[in-house]
């Protein structure tokens, strides 16, 4: 840069302290941190007493330590000298206003809070890493960042606007026997359906029951509930009942993933039962039924020649006829969902439901159970074909992101912290905090 112009370093601007109403008057660099001595910008109005209106005179100074945004990942501490005044009239004592720099009694500056919140939400940093970069304790960083996240993001009523499609599912938040391990997650699927963006976590409720979901819905404004059009869910009847009672105008859609899994589970139970009846033991490596366990779950249009030969050999044995019948229903269900023409797909699914609800032999106990379930939830299953783009798949993907969050934090013991961290991590706030990120 031959034409570059260099000026005297201005630490106040470089460290963005002018935004906080502070001026740097000195610095001290240590091996593990940087300390900046600051004073509060002069304000003539601060010299006058708010009680009697008389002018105050300087009395003394106090020092306040604030953790600031790290510079080059070196922890930065602000040593703020605050002047105190004493009124010449009534004797009242007050100090310079530092509310621009930090909240009262806070240990982090407002810039540090913003930096930590962006790091948590956009960069997916752990609280331990943030605490290390700010040179504060884990509790201090966690309490401050979660409080700031709740104030700036979670308590914003605008985040519930425009929600027309939601998904609901259960999620295991801790894998221990102590206390309730399930939470109910509610996902905003509107952006995914409209192809305007990814889905986002809307709320997380402790417990997994009809009452948990019903209570959350009842707490929402009536206008918000009236705007909901679709609720995607799995086969849990508690979610279905809560939706029917609180959202009578909304359409319940049973997610294709869970419907297919019902058929897949029926196929697995049938295979295990036949295996036990024929051989008297669970599947082993050399047993044909056990060797074909994964091939049976592969779509018929995706089978390789080797897989087709394996299934042909398997079904040539008359002892495996029950498995073949259940496999046929499973493949019909997959084919209905893969049908490009939704009207045709709905017709195929309707025919399948009718075929497994009437005239199924008593020996096919798994298909009879599947038929009862499909008959009970037929309207919800068929609603998928009338609501294109509505799927609880993004909800399942959200569960994966929450699993990653819990793993990076090495587990959670506090449900309140877990809910707050989950909402910040997957609540769709990245673009708001950092417009440069997608």
Image (cartoon, rainbow, N blue to C red):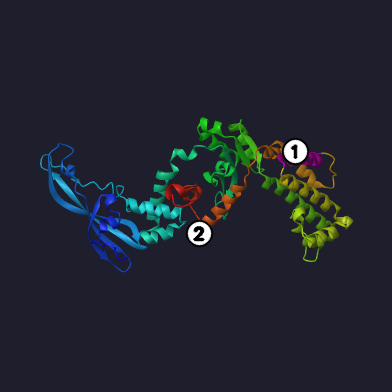
Q: Nearer the viewer, residue 260 or 144?
A: 260
User: Which mark is first along the chain, 2 or 1?
Assistant: 1
Q: Residues within 10 Å of mark 1 (few under 14, many from 20)?
A: some
Is residue 116 rendered magenta in the image?
A: no
> Residue, x 49% and y 54% (percent of image)?
413
> Residue, x 84% and y 58% (percent of image)?
312
Q: Position of residue 409 (x, y in %)?
A: 49, 58
Q: Position of residue 251 (x, y in %)?
A: 63, 35
Q: Position of residue 333 (x, y in %)?
A: 75, 46
Is residue 28 visible to us here?
A: yes
Q: Position of residue 191 (x, y in %)?
A: 55, 43
Residue 438 falls left or right of residue 251: left
Callout 1: SS: helix
Callout 2: SS: helix
Q: Check the image and name the residue furthest to the bottom.
A: 31
Circle 2 residue:
408
Identify the mark at residue 375; answer none if there is no mark.
1
Q: Nearer the viewer, residue 322 or 345?
A: 345
Residue 21 falls left or right of residue 70: left
Image: 260 above or below 15: above
Image quadrant for the N terminus?
bottom left
Image: 298 above or below 205: below
Q: Which residues are magenta?
A: 341-357
């Amino acid at each position: 840069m031959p034409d570059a112009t260099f000026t005297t370093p201005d630490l106040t601007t470089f460290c963005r302290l002018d935004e906080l109403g502070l001026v740097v008057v000195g610095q001290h660099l240590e091996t593990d941190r940087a300390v900046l001595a600051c004073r509060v910008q002069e304000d003539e109005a601060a010299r006058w007493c708010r009680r009697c209106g008389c002018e105050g005179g300087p009395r003394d100074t106090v020092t306040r330590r604030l953790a600031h945004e790290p510079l080059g990942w070196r922890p930065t501490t602000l040593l703020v000298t605050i002047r105190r005044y004493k009124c010449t009239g009534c004797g009242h004592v007050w100090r310079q206003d530092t509310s621009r720099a930090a909240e009262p009694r806070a240990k982090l500056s407002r810039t540090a809070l913003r930096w930590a919140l962006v790091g948590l939400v956009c960069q997916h940093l752990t609280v331990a890493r943030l605490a290390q970069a700010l040179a504060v304790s884990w509790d201090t960083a966690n309490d401050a960042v979660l409080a700031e996240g709740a104030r700036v993001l979670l308590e914003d009523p605008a985040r519930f606007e425009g929600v027309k499609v939601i998904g609901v599912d259960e999620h295991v938040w801790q894998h221990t026997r102590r206390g309730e391990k399930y939470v109910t997650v509610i996902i905003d699927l509107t952006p995914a359906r409209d192809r305007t963006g990814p889905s986002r976590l809307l709320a997380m409720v402790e417990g997994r029951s009809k009452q948990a979901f019903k209570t959350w819905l009842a707490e929402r404004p009536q206008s918000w509930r009236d705007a909901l059009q679709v609720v995607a869910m799995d086969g849990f009847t508690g979610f279905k009942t809560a939706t029917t009672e609180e959202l009578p105008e909304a359409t319940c859609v049973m997610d294709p993933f869970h419907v297919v899994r019902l058929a897949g589970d029926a196929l697995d139970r049938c295979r295990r039962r036949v295996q036990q009846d024929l051989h008297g033991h669970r599947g082993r490596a050399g047993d044909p039924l056990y060797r074909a366990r994964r091939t049976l779950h592969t779509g018929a249009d995706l089978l390789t020649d080797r897989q087709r030969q394996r299934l042909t050999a398997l079904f040539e044995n008359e002892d495996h006829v029950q498995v073949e019948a259940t496999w046929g229903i499973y493949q019909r269900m997959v084919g209905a969902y893969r049908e490009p023409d939704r009207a045709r797909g709905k017709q195929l699914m309707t025919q399948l439901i009718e075929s497994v609800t009437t005239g199924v032999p008593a020996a096919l106990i798994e298909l009879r159970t599947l038929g009862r379930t499909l008959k009970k939830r037929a309207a919800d299953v068929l609603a998928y074909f009338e609501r294109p783009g509505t799927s609880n798949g993004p909800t399942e993907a959200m569960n994966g992101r929450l699993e990653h969050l819990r793993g990076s934090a090495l587990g959670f013991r506090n449900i309140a912290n877990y809910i707050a961290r989950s909402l910040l991590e997957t609540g769709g706030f990245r673009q708001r905090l950092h417009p440069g990120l997608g």
